[in-house]
Structures are given as C-alpha cells and as structure tokens.
C-alpha cells in the first residue's frame, strides 16, 4: 500500500476520520481527497411496495426502521431490548430474512412478534421511497474503529427519505446528527438511553424533518460526490472542462409515497 500510494496521482478516502488513519499508515504528507459514499438520487423511483402496508400498520403507529446488513455489532438487538419498554412502537428491519442474526433475533424476541417486522430488500432505486413512510431511521452500531470514522451509506439514505435519525454515540455520525439537528444521539448499547432518544424524536418528528433543506440533501448525494471525483479525474488528466452548476433537488411528496 505504501509503495503504490507513493506512485499514485491521487489518494481518495471517504471521510476526514479515515484520513487521520491513512496518513500515518501510508506514511504520506498529502491529505487524501474525500469522495463520500452517498446515495445516488437521480433515477430514484416510487417504491412498488409500501413499508407500512407490508408491516400491516396504519400511518398513526410510530414506526422505526433499520435498513441493511445485520450483525450483533450493528446494535439491532439493543433496539429490540428497548422496544420492550416502548409498547406502542414498531420496528421494521429491512434485511436478508435468512441472515443468522435476524433469525436469532426473531427467536430471542418472540414476545415482540407483533411489533418486529422483518422485510426483504427492495430494489436500490426504490429504497428511499420505501423508507419514507417510517418515522425514524436507526443506526445503533457499537463502538468499533470502522464505525467511528465515516458516515455509512444508510445515513444518506435516511436523509434522502427525510427521516429523523437516531444514532449511537459513534464519533462521526453522532457529530453530524448534532450539527444538523436531524435526530438524537444515544449511548451505544444502552437500551434505556435509546428509549429516551426514541421518545424525543417521535414526539418532535416534524421539527427534525423541517431541517432537511434542498441544500443539505443535495450535499449528501452521489451527484455531489461525483463532482468531487470528476474534478480529481480532470486534474489528473490535465483538462479544464466548463464548470457545471451544482445540483439542487428534493423529493416531492407523491414520489416519496
């Protein structure tokens, strides 16, 4: 890695936190350039499925959602433990139903069967629309080095779906939620503190959603990150194309539903 990075025209990473690790690891003095792993917005389509319909619940029922890979360190078990203390709240888990951890959770939390809904993945182009009927997006991950240093993909997907976010107190994502005031932070692996954060977000959902401006959403898109990437390519290639205007967009209500 050190040999090839020394010969490279550019070094890319996904976050400033990653840069802090890469620079001493690669023994480089130039700061890597950031191209974050944000979701592609152009081409997003209304979902053929409706998350609430799939869960068999009405629009008035508080619905938390977790989307993506499931493993013990992802913290879904902590949310399920908290759900026992939130009897009016439901959890939708969009994941592989055959995942071993998912199956274990269904056994361990069999008493939550009527409020714990496992749904299969939807096409990526429909994910934002599918997520949008939930009330809160969850990132309850545990403290691991790779969890601390960047915004994971679902962070941007929840934002594009205009969901308030509840995240554990991992460094980078907790800081971003606090900076934008788009959700609440709880102490990782602490189900009681999750209950506190969950109750607060559900009660004030409208306030958090109102902070999703078109500028914030366009910043957390692959279209914006692609501008960074193309700029790097052009510099390496020694060309100077005409600048393109920054994209600005928001999902209209019919598309979200």
Image (cartoon, rainbow, N blue to C red):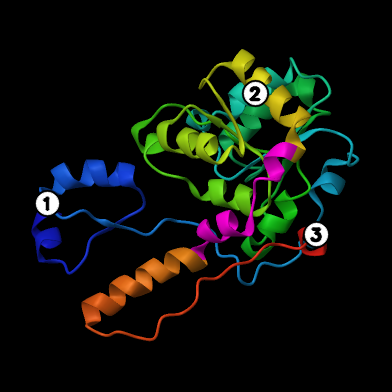
Left or right placement of residue 184 versus residue 106 in this view: left
- How would you classify the magenta stretch by its main secondary structure? helix
- Mark 3 vs mark 1, foreground winner is 3
Specify the label residue 197 is tagged with.
2
Residue numbers of the magenta segment = 207-222
Q: Between disc 1 and disc 2, whose residue precedes?
A: 1
Camera-nearest residue between 246 and 83: 246
Alpha carbon separation for disc pair 1 and 2:
41 Å
Q: Position of residue 120 (x, y in %)?
A: 69, 49
Camera-nearest residue between 85 and 206: 206
**Residue drawn 47% across the image and 27% down it:** 142
Residue tagged 3: 253
The kind of secondary structure element at disc 3 is helix
Q: Between disc 3 and disc 2, whose residue precedes?
A: 2
Question: Is 176 situated above or below 219?
Answer: above
Left or right placement of residue 132 versus residue 222 in this view: right
Residue 117 appearing in the image: no
Q: Position of residue 9 (x, y in %)?
A: 17, 69
The reply to whether the C-beta atoms of the residues labelled 1 and 2 are less than 8 Å apart is: no
Alpha carbon separation for disc pair 3 and 1:
47 Å
Residue 174 appearing in the image: yes
The kind of secondary structure element at disc 1 is loop
**Residue drawn 23% across the image and 60% down it:** 11
Residue tagged 1: 28
């Amino acid at each position: 890695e050190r040999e090839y990075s020394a010969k490279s025209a550019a070094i890319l990473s996904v976050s400033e936190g990653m840069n802090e690790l890469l620079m001493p690891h690669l023994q480089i003095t130039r700061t890597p350039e950031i191209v974050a792993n944000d979701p592609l917005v152009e081409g997003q389509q209304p979902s053929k499925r409706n998350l609430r319909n799939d869960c068999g619940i009405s629009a008035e029922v508080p619905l938390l959602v977790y989307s993506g890979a499931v493993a013990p360190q992802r913290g879904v078990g902590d949310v399920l433990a908290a759900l026992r203390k939130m009897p009016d709240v439901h959890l939708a888990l969009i994941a592989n139903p055959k995942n071993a951890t998912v199956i274990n959770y269904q056994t361990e939390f069999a008493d939550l069967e009527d409020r714990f809904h496992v749904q299969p993945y939807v096409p990526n182009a429909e994910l934002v629309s599918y997520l949008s009927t939930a009330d809160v997006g969850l990132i309850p991950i545990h403290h691991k080095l790779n969890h601390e240093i960047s915004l994971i993909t679902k962070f941007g997907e929840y934002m594009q779906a205009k969901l308030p976010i509840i995240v554990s107190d991992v460094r980078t994502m907790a800081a971003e939620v606090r900076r934008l005031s788009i959700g609440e932070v709880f102490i990782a692996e602490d189900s009681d503190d999750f209950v506190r954060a969950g109750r607060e977000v559900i009660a004030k959902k409208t306030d958090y959603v109102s902070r999703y401006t078109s500028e914030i959403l366009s910043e957390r898109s692959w279209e914006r990150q692609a501008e960074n990437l193309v700029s790097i390519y052009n510099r390496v290639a020694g060309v100077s194309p005409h600048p393109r205007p920054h994209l600005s967009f928001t999902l209209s209500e019919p598309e979200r539903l």
